[in-house]
């Protein structure tokens, strides 16, 4: 069968159709993960670009991050005028799905970055892509490897949908409690912790990221005196009072043991775990509604911080401990499946170079 080499410009054509506004079309943005909702829902779409099924849409300023997607979902849609669109004109030579596997590789992203750095704004355009050379096996061999990739992609999508369903169940439980139960201030159930690292017994210095996880501190700790740092023990909460609105609050787990955090952090614990589970409280303190509300309450303080006095005033529904445990177990199941889904997503990305190499190796034989 053998392999054939082409310049992509021989196989693709740029689409330059502008949106005329005569029909209602959904607007989409693009990231490394695929199509995303645009950040500006009320943007002027009169100069947006139109794209169709099996078109590729990409952000010329973000190609080093692989911000490109093959449209397998929408018959017709629109994207920002800053984006560029192209489609395969020689499907007898290369399948769009095979070209997508070629594109969704780190090697391709690095090449885009290299080619873009010579432009005025580090843009990578269709004209640049057209100069790329691509080695292709036969269409039959391409289809064989595309089928493998699509099967994995469909399995991931099915698993991801089940993960989202589980999240909806958990969110539904919480919403039902919020509607039906009277809320109580949590100040009765929590206590601030102010244990300092006076004898330097703890050396692990961490902070809390906006993802709600403890992580190694990014601050320069050279010459820092850690005697005044606060100790966070398992089952204690820590949060950055000036960044809690961004999600910087976390619950320390048993496995990770103790750590120390900046003296500016607030550390507290649940003092009556028979009435209030720490994990259940974390569910409420991690909700976007709560995080947004902290900005409002913090704005009245001297430094726009959400201190422990503000935390005491937070009110949530507190059902029987058995109900709390049930909700927490569902949420833990969701978190675990979400972790598996992220691992599957990473495997899906890493499989592209493997499949491309396999198809080329088979094409040589």
Image: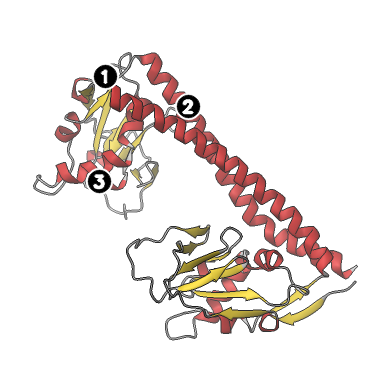
Identified at 46% across, 80% down, the residue is 122
Looking at the image, the residue that sits furthest to the front is: 22
Q: Quadrant of the C terminus?
A: bottom right
Along the viewing direction, whichever of 154 and 271 lies nearer the viewer: 154
Q: Alpha carbon of mark 2 to alpha carbon of mark 3: how far?
A: 42 Å
Circle 2 SS class:
helix
Tally of numbered tags = 3
Disc nearest the viewer among 2 and 1: 2
| Residue 304 in the image: above or below residue 232 | below
Q: Is residue 170 left or right of residue 308?
A: right
- In percent of width and height, residue 155 lies at 66, 45
Instruction: Tell which of 307 and 175 is nearer to you.
Output: 175
Circle 3 residue: 225
Q: Which residue is mark 1?
A: 271
Residue 335, above or below 350: above
Q: Quadrant of residue 196?
A: top left
What coloring was used for the rendering? secondary structure
Kindly report the distance in space between the C-alpha atoms of the residues bearing marks 2 and 1.
24 Å
Q: State the SS at label 3.
A: loop
Residue 113 spot, x, y in % from top left: 53, 75
Which residue has dot 2 on it? 330
**Is mark 2 in CB contact (under 8 Å) with mark 1?**
no
> Residue 342, percent across and down?
55, 46
Residue under the point 38% across and 40% down: 204
- Of badges 3 and 1, nearer the viewer stands 1
Sequence order check, earlier mark of 2 and 1: 1
Q: Are marks 3 and 1 in contact (CB under 8 Å)?
A: no
Q: In terms of sequence position, does the residue under pointer 2 or pointer 3 come before the other? A: 3
Q: Dividing the picture into quarters, in which one does residue 103 lie?
A: bottom right
Question: Closer to the N terminus: mark 3 or mark 1?
Answer: 3
* Image location (x, y in percent) of residue 93: 77, 75
Query: How many angstroms separate mark 3 from mark 1 (CA)?
Result: 30 Å
């Amino acid at each position: 069968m053998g392999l054939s080499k082409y310049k992509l410009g021989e196989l693709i054509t740029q689409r330059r159709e502008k949106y005329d506004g005569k029909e209602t079309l959904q607007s989409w943005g693009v990231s490394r993960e695929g199509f995303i909702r645009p950040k500006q829902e009320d943007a002027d779409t009169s100069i947006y670009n139109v794209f169709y099924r099996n078109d590729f849409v990409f952000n010329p300023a973000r190609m080093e991050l692989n911000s490109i997607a093959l449209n397998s979902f929408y018959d017709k849609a629109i994207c920002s005028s800053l984006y560029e669109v192209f489609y395969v004109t020689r499907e007898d030579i290369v399948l769009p799905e095979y070209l997508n596997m070629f594109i969704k590789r780190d090697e391709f992203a690095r090449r885009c970055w290299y080619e873009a750095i010579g432009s005025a704004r580090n843009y990578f355009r269709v004209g640049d892509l057209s100069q790329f050379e691509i080695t292709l096996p036969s269409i039959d061999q391409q289809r064989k490897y595309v089928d493998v990739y699509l099967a994995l992609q469909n399995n991931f999508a099915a698993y991801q949908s089940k993960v989202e369903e589980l999240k909806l169940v958990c969110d539904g439980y919480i919403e039902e409690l919020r509607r039906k139960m009277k809320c109580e201030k949590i100040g009765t159930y929590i206590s601030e912790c102010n244990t300092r690292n006076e004898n330097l017994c703890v050396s692990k210095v961490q902070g809390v990221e906006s993802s709600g996880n403890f992580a190694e501190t990014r601050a320069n700790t050279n010459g820092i005196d850690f005697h005044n740092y606060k100790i966070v023990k398992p089952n204690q909460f820590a949060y950055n009072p000036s960044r809690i609105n961004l999600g910087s609050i976390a619950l320390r787990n048993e496995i990770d043991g103790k750590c120390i955090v900046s003296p500016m952090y607030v550390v507290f614990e649940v003092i009556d775990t028979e009435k209030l589970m720490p994990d259940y409280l974390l569910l409420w303190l991690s909700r976007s509604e709560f995080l947004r509300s902290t900005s409002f309450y913090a704005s009245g303080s001297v430094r726009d911080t959400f201190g422990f006095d503000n935390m005491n005033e937070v009110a949530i529904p507190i059902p029987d401990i058995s109900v709390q445990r049930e909700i927490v177990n569902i949420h833990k199941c969701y978190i675990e499946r979400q972790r598996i889904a992220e691992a599957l997503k990473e495997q899906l990305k890493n499989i592209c170079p493997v499949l491309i190499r396999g198809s080329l190796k088979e094409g040589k034989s």
